[in-house]
Amino acid sequence: MRILLSFRKKIKSLEDEQLILLFSRGKDNKIIDEIYYRYNHLVLGTCMKYLKNKMDAEDLTLEFQSKTY
């Protein structure tokens, strides 16, 4: 458990470019989760802008995330 918390702390301190590089090397879902956490609000906002419906925007945001795994 302690190692997992240490890994999460390390991930949060990295720049986006470093996270993408790490993900491309190891395909660790924890890394891509951090990127989604950082930018999820922007994806949702863009979906809201075009769809004009909160539920549809949330559904599309979740669908987008599920397609990238």
Image (cartoon, grey):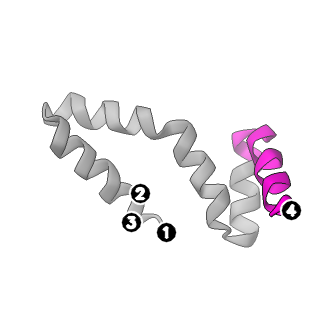
Q: Which residue is mark 4?
A: 3
Query: Which quarter of the rendering shows the N terminus?
Result: bottom right
Residue 69's disc is 1
Q: Quadrant of residue 30?
A: bottom right
Residue 67's disc is 3
64 shown above or below 29: above
Q: Along the polypeptide, which appears first: circle 1 or circle 4?
A: 4
Asked if disc 4 and disc 2 are in contact, CB closer than 8 Å, the reply is: no
As for residue 4 lying within the magenta part, the answer is yes
Residue at the far front: name it.
1
Residue 65's disc is 2
Is 60 left, or right, of 65 in this rendering?
A: left
Asked if disc 1 and disc 2 are in contact, CB closer than 8 Å, the reply is: yes
Residue at 24 percent across and 51 percent down: it is 59
Residue at 72 percent across and 44 percent down: it is 17
Residue at 51 percent across and 38 percent down: it is 39
The Cα atoms of the two marked residues, 4 and 2, are separated by 26 Å
User: For the residue labelled by badge 4, is the local secondary structure a helix, a strand or a loop?
Assistant: helix
Is 60 left, or right, of 32 in this rendering?
A: left
48 shown above or below 57: above
**Residue toward you, 2 or 29:** 2
Q: Along the polypeptide, which appears first: circle 4 or circle 3?
A: 4
Residue at 74 percent across and 71 percent down: it is 26
Horizontal and vertical percent position of residue 21: 75, 56
> What's under tag 1, amino acid-wise?
Tyr
Q: Residues within 10 Å of mark 1 (few under 14, many from 20)?
A: few
